[in-house]
Image (cartoon, rainbow, N blue to C red):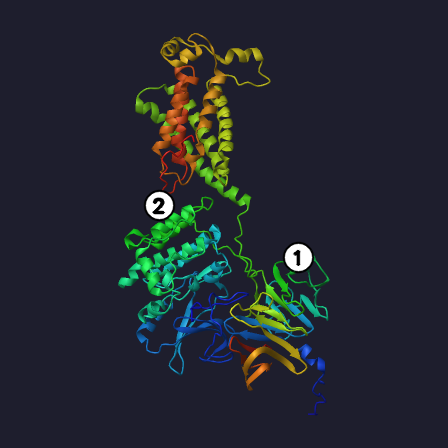
Amino acid sequence: MTVSDESPAPITDDVQDHTAPYALWIDGVGGYLLCLSHCVTIGQAQVQQHGQADIALLADISRHHATLHRDSEGYWLEALKPARIHGKPIAKEFLRNGDRITLGKSCQLQFFQPVPMSISARLDIVSGHRFAEPIEAVLLLADTPVVIGPSAQAHVQVPEMTESLKLLRTKTGMVVCWPGEISGPDGVVQGRAPLVPGTTVSTDQITLALERMR
Amino acid sequence: MKRTVGNAAISVRFTHPTGAMIAMKFTYQSGYKPLPGYTIKRGIGQGAFGEVYFAVTDSGKQVALKLIHNKNLEKEMRGIQQCLNLKHQNLVHLYDVRTDDAGFHWLIMEYVAGEPLSSIVARYPNGAPAELAIQWFQGLAAAVQYLHQHGILHRDLKPANIFLENGLIKVGDFGLCKIIADSAQAMTGEVGTAPYMAPEICNGIYKESVDIYAAGVILFELVTGRVPFEGQSVQEILKKHLYDAPDLTTVPMPFKLILQKALAKDPRQRYQTIMDMAKDVACAIPTTEPGATRPADVTMPVGADEIPEVIPATPSMIFQQRWSELTGILLTAIIASAILAIAWPLFFGRGDWSHLAPLFFLVLAASASVMIPSKLWVPSDDEESWTRRLMHMSLGFVLALFALWLEGYELPAPWVPANRLEVLHTWQPGPTDVQVLKGSWAGWWYGVNTSMPILACYLSYFGLMFMVLRWWKVTEVHRPSRISIWSLICVAFWGYLLLFLLPGQHQREIGFLTVFLTAVVCQIACPWKEKGALKPKKKLRLATA
């Protein structure tokens, strides 16, 4: 047997852009699929994990039905199979807040960019279909933060909170920003703490956990 | 302040369950495995006596796990075990009860990916649309009836325990409620439960009436957006339950009578079963098909600011349904007309047997002309009264022509020579008719020996007869009784009053009998359902006004 000449893939700055999505669990609120990549695939859920789309839906759509592309302006929807926005067939279309996306015959998603100045977005199923994962919605994390807070201008609205928690990406990974103490795996820190897959961070108002999906 | 967040599985979209407290702290974090095979993903909510978690089994099944804090509840846990095998589409299913290494009990149950009714109600400060309230109530009633039939009281019905998942109502937290009641938590700190507590609970009486009262409070809340009795403390609210009459002034009419009965202080005056109440609620809107519990419409969960829409039946579906109902009605009408037409001379011992066939056909035609338009065209409100009257009047004209034709007269038509019509459409009184006319005001009106324009006589009699009365009332499903004496008296009164329009003895008999027997036939043929508590006080349903 010869020694394989396979070496670990070179680590680049871009590597986290190709990561598979995470699950973000927020106590008392819900579960969310967190997508960081600049290219997110949408498709039908598969039996085997291999070839599974990033956003897998239990719906009558293709295995790889559409792709979301992110640039510095926002998100584009590229249709690989028939897709419509507000009922109008599209090939590649820039997504705006409130756009209703129809994939195939019946599966409908709605795209939200609720936070001004942040292109990070939220994707909801509005047709009664389900995600393959036990989640409420998809959060698309761009270079600008995902906001969890009391106002309607938040990706996840939690009316009981008094301050907003921001989730953003850095070169080293994801961090949460909170005006106050954050307790995480490394103890209590002030203002800013890393959010590492497999761990839980909590403030006095909210607790969230990040999990690697696949 | 600590408040209930709904005891069973709650999932939240944009909104949060009502009144959740800030800093909801859960004992266990995401990733923890309290029981072998179950991995907690996140906390869902905190209830009166435990925490609820969303968990996934190793094989991927999504469940809700309820951690019951009290340890020494062996006896009550057997009460839960009694409920473990209950199956109903409107109940949150219980899968299992397990005990962890620390001795805590975990209830494993169905994960409901829907909103609690409490947060839906919060979106309708002035009450939900009546159709939705009725539809939701049917689901709730079906679940409660199932529990009652299995000898189980819910004891803690409230919107926070009721969920709406894809348009289907799911009632949770049954079988656990005895624990709440026994541990006296309900009486001490849980304001969330007090607005739904029946007065007799203060005397320690728990019967089906407790759930029916709570269902009444929930219906009140669905319809008006608030609960009937509010207060700062449990004691204050309970006192109101005991002594205050609920303020029903803001409740729309059909619900008012239902709530009056459901919220009665004396359990004996309430509905005796939840289904009795559900039947009345189903009839609360005239446009809903009575009695029939509508299947849970598949509704699409949409954004938080929108409500799940009921998929309406298409006009063609409604028409088809009404048409199939109508064929049955018409068959009954044929039999009823035949029997009545024969029974009339038999019963009164007079009348010409040769008149039977025309009478039968006339009654049948008149009944059909009343029932077909009334059943096929049901306007949404009573505003259309005059449109409907005029429509019936025009059918009365057609009926008059039919009566003429049955009598052997030729109908006015372009191909009939005008001179022939002139002769045929006048009526010469015979010797007996002159006798009758001499003593009557019709004779004074027309003159005794003059010939009469019979076409005009028939047209005016049948036209007016069908215009002055609201004939569609005798076809309504919710008329006061199957055969209303009052409507018959109305018909007889007007039928007799307008008789002066008809010239001869024979025509009068035919005319009067036709309209009177039509009223009878229509009421025999058209299905009737008692309205229960909603029996209207109005007597003159077929009155002219």
Label 2 environment density (alpha carbons within 10 Å; few <14, some 14–19, many ≥20): some
| Vertical relation: B380 (above or below) B388 | below
Which quarter of the rendered picture does the C terminus of chain B lie within?
A: top left
Q: From where the camera sits, is residue B507 visible?
A: yes
Q: In the image, residue B290 lies at what x, y percent?
A: 42, 46
Q: Position of residue A35 (x, y in %)?
A: 63, 73
Does residue B286 appear to the left or right of A156 in the view shown? left
Q: Which labelled disc corresponds to residue B532?
A: 2
| Residue at the image point whose x is 33% and y is 58% from the top | B241
Determine whether, in the image, residue B10 is placed left or right of residue A102. Answer: left
In the picture of the structure, the residue carrying the numbered disc 1 is A86
Q: Measuring from the top left, give residue B476's x and y in whole percent.
A: 42, 38
Observer able to see residue B82:
no
Dot 1 falls on a residue whose secondary structure is loop
Secondary element under disc 2, as helix, strand or loop, is helix
Residue A63 percent across, percent down from the top left: 65, 68
Q: Nearer the viewer, residue A105 or B73?
A: B73
Residues A123 and B515: in front is: A123
Mark 2–mark 1 Cα distance, whole angstroms, equals 48 Å
**Which of the 4 quarters of the picture holds residue B331?**
top left
Quarter the N terminus of chain B occupies: bottom left
Q: Does residue B425 lie above or below B306 as drawn?
A: above
Q: In this rendering, is residue B477 above or below A143?
A: above
2 and 1 marks in contact (CB < 8 Å): no
- Horizontal relation, residue A48 to residue B512: left or right: right
Same chain? Circles 2 and 1? no
Residue type beneath disc 1: His
Return the chain for callout 2: B
- Asked if residue A59 is positioned above or below residue B452 in the image, the reply reads below
Mark 1 belongs to which subunit?
A: A
* Residue closest to the eye, A182 or B477: A182
- Please state which amino acid type lies under the numbered disc 2: Gly
